[in-house]
Image (tube, grey):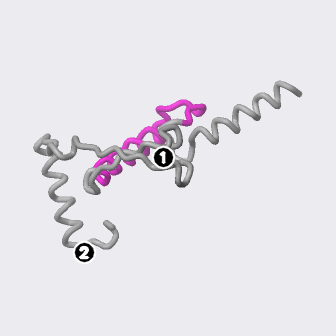
Amino acid sequence: MVKNWPAEVIDKVYELLIKLWNDKHIPEHHKWRFFCLLPKVPGSEKLEDMRPISLMDVVRKLWLGFFVEKISKFSEKHKLLDSAQNAYRHHLGTDSATLGLINIFEVIRE
């Protein structure tokens, strides 16, 4: 959606976000979230077959994404997180942590 915005709109949104930052102001609607349930199992209406997701407006997602990206790059550049840390790092997650753990168990077993 944002990729289709005209350059003037992107510039204006950026300008307004900078103003929010400089004024140390958080708009009330940036504190709102809408929780929705999506079925993990197609067609099921059972609560245990649902996945909760949180929806927020696009500008807030952009704002958060901008800072998360900056913080991530800074922490990677300065090696603030241990190399074994998988959470909160780009291209790492529970899948890579699980593979690492399996490799450790295999080495121990040998």
Front residue of 73 and 36: 36
Kind of residue indicated by mark 2: Pro
Q: Is residue 65 left or right of residue 106?
A: left
For the point 10% across and 43% down, which residue is it?
23
Determine which quarter of the picture holds residue 33: top left
Residue position for label 2? 6
User: Residue 75: x, y in percent?
Assistant: 44, 38
For the point 56% across and 49% down, which residue is it?
41
Q: Which residue range is magenta in the image?
A: 61-86
Is 78 inside the magenta-drawn segment? yes
76 over 39 or under it: above or below: above
Kind of residue indicated by mark 1: Glu
- Mark 2 neighbour class, 10 Å CA radius: few under 14, some 14 to 19, many 20 or more: few
For the point 82% across and 31% down, which residue is it?
106
Determine which quarter of the picture holds residue 14: bottom left
Q: Are marks 1 and 2 in contact (CB under 8 Å)?
A: no
Residue position for label 1? 45
Is 56 inside the magenta-drawn segment? no
User: Residue 82: x, y in percent?
Assistant: 55, 30
For the point 58% across and 33% down, which residue is it?
83
User: Residue 85: x, y in percent?
Assistant: 56, 32
